[in-house]
Image (cartoon, coloured by chain):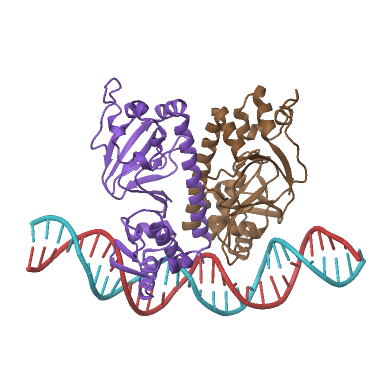
Chain colours: A purple, B brown, C red, D cyan
Amino acid sequence: MAVFSRPPTPGSPLAQEPCLSCGARADSVCNAIEDADLGRLAAFAVVSEVQPGQTFIEEGDPADSFFNLTAGSAKLYKLMTDGRRQITGFVGRGHFLGLAVSATYAFSAEAIEPVRLCRFSRVRMFRLLGEFPALERRLLERAATELVAAQEQMLLLGRKTARERVASFLDVLCRPGAGPCGRAAPVVALPMSRSDIADYLGLTIETVSRTLSRLRSEGLIEIPSPTTIRICDPARLAALASG
Amino acid sequence: MAVFSRPPTPGSPLAQEPCLSCGARADSVCNAIEDADLGRLAAFAVVSEVQPGQTFIEEGDPADSFFNLTAGSAKLYKLMTDGRRQITGFVGRGHFLGLAVSATYAFSAEAIEPVRLCRFSRVRMFRLLGEFPALERRLLERAATELVAAQEQMLLLGRKTARERVASFLDVLCRPGAGPCGRAAPVVALPMSRSDIADYLGLTIETVSRTLSRLRSEGLIEIPSPTTIRICDPARLAALASG
DNA sequence: CGGGCACATTGACCTGGATCAATGAATCCG
DNA sequence: CGGATTCATTGATCCAGGTCAATGTGCCCG
């Protein structure tokens, strides 16, 4: 799995360098830690890369690592024995993963785009949390934010129509500063397949495809390529998303 | 809303008493705090009671309080403008509520059974978290546990059949030590209405009722009263729940 | 450059659960 | 104690989205 990995070098004067220059720092819980203390963080992290399609967390495996995604994107999912799958979220740069209380992971994680991640062992992670209260506070904030998102997703899965689900999905994707959203018709990249979208929205591939086609025929969106969608009418899409 | 409330009395020698003798303490994050420090906690808490049917958190309202449920049970839910409702969880004694990062609550909460709760203002809660790292750790654990439950619920809502959803619901209810589960056929109390169950499982009242009737006709459960269900065959129910 | 392969789209039909509509069954009062 | 009200159950019908099947549409590699 680990294509590239760097053993900790605690004594080095440049020990904090990898974290200091990390492009994901601003998006990550790591920014709770002062520059001067970054060496401590860097000493505990093991960096690795994961290629698309590769699984780096397996549901049911011993949960002995925490991960911080520093590049790329991944999907989190749960499987039923007969193969039914629910994708519980897509995660990108800066996302923290694996905060399990139980002894095993409750979900699997698979790279969609080439992923780079920092891995921390369970014990080291807890040691860091003890040392840096600000880090723990940041994690708590993240967890709370994710809970809110999870509740929103439950509403979507339990009560929204296919049309509303797809609209909600696109609405969320084009909302945060994710991409050049500068008041022109926002274009969203879809790194995931139709199958992933379907398993995220609790639908089938066919329904996702049909619904997107219909939204296009109504002039709400354009689909230059299967992995790119231009939102022509964000306001109407948002209205659709909420019923 | 607050039928009964007690102003803080920091100086009193008995200041920690209400927390010390609190029946919910063992089930709550409060047990992260030493007996000697309970006065601090008690000084910040405002106790209140809420009757069934009363809402004590309103989605969209300013999120300026945190709550700790010390008795009774409540439902958490999100509403759509046209009245569609998704219940995101049922909570009982010891449950912590209102950990919002955003300025407003992301869900509403309504009592099912008479509820007693401790309310902490936002600023006081954060002050407590700063004073008692163990409390913050406990909250983080709780949040992680809830995230795992939320993911499980997403699987249920996105991919399970009505039969599997109802079976899962009963399975979870009879699993934890909630009630005299002593190896005899466990009996679960359902304080919530069929309508609540339906909105929790992403189904209609009718489907819930029909599914329960079918499970009964198959000898898996008995329904002595609408609010009581006896699980005759927990193993088969669990198998059903997971597909 | 063309055959093969994986993914996406589109169409035709079917079904699980929703909707609509009575009919119990329990609780509350007057 | 009886009418009203609310909640749960059961039945009849309908339809959104699933299933099955065929047809694009790239893209990779020989």
**Between residues C22 and D10, which one lies in front from this camera angle?**
C22
**Residue A9 point in image, percent of width and height:** 27, 23
Where is B7 relative to A130, above or below?
A: below
* Residue B242 in view: no
**Between residues A52 and A166, which one lies in front from this camera angle?**
A166
Q: Residue furthest front?
A: A183
**Residue B35 point in image, percent of width and height:** 66, 23
Q: Is residue B55 left or right of residue A105?
A: right
Give the quarter of the image for residue A2.
Answer: top left
Q: Residue furthest top?
A: A11
**Between residues B103 and D10, which one lies in front from this camera angle?**
B103
* Residue B61 in view: yes
| Number of numbered labels in the structure image | 0
**Residue D28 point in image, percent of width and height:** 16, 56
Where is A157 relative to B175, above or below?
A: below
Q: Is residue A180 left or right of residue B207?
A: left
Q: The N terminus of chain A is located in which quarter?
A: top left
**Residue A61 point in image, percent of width and height:** 40, 38
Please report the residue visible at 56 percent of the width from the left and 43 percent of the height from the top. B99
Q: Is residue C17 left or right of residue B73?
A: left
